[in-house]
Image (cartoon, grey):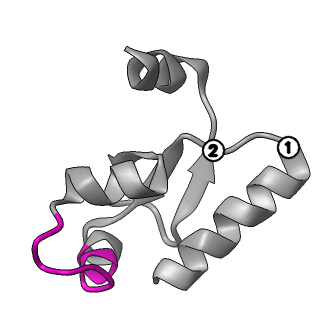
């Protein structure tokens, strides 16, 4: 899961020239992502490492990333 997320981040950066700041996952995806990190890592810490805000979306069939200015403002605060 982590390798897939890094790949979609890289692909987004190559296509748009900017690091995404949103990661859309469903609950199952988020549980798989947690297993890629030490159990000492909270989801908040994982999103800090990835530099992404997490959006849990049960309708999300596949993890995907996006960029939005409102998330950027929140990160900068």
Compared across the picture, whether 20 is left or right of 28 comes to: right
Confirm whether residue 74 shows in the render: yes
Q: Is residue 35 above or below residue 69?
A: below
User: What secondary structure is found at the residue carrying circle 1?
Assistant: helix
Compared across the picture, whether 35 is left or right of 21 comes to: left
Compared across the picture, whether 14 is left or right of 66 comes to: right
Confirm whether residue 57 shows in the render: no
Label 1 to label 2: alpha-carbon separation: 9 Å
Q: Is residue 21 above or below residue 43?
A: above
Image quarter hosting the C terminus: top left
Dot 1: few (<14), some (14–19), or many (≥20) neighbours within 10 Å? few
Q: Is residue 56 above or below residue 22?
A: below
What percent of the width, then of the height, locates residue 18?
A: 76, 40
Between 62 and 3, the residue placed more toward the observer is: 3
Label at residue 41: none
Label at residue 20: 2
What percent of the width, then of the height, locates residue 62?
A: 53, 72
User: What secondary structure is found at the residue carrying circle 2?
Assistant: loop
Q: Which residues are magenta?
A: 31-41
Residue at the location (79% across, 64% down)?
Answer: 11
Residue at the location (78% across, 52% down)?
Answer: 13
Q: Is residue 68 magenta?
A: no
Residue at the location (15% across, 61% down)?
Answer: 42
* Residues at discs 1 and 2 in contact (Cβ within 8 Å): yes
What percent of the width, then of the height, locates residue 61?
A: 49, 71
Give the tally of numbered discs. Answer: 2
Label at residue 16: 1
> Predominant secondary structure in magenta?
loop
């Amino acid at each position: 899961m982590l390798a897939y997320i890094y790949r979609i981040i890289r692909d987004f950066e190559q296509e748009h020239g900017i690091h995404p700041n949103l990661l859309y996952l469903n609950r199952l995806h988020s549980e798989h992502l947690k297993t890629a990190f030490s159990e000492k890592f909270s989801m908040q810490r994982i999103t800090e490492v990835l530099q992404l805000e997490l959006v849990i979306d049960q309708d999300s069939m596949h993890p995907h990333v996006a960029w939005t200015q409102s998330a950027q403002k929140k990160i900068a605060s």
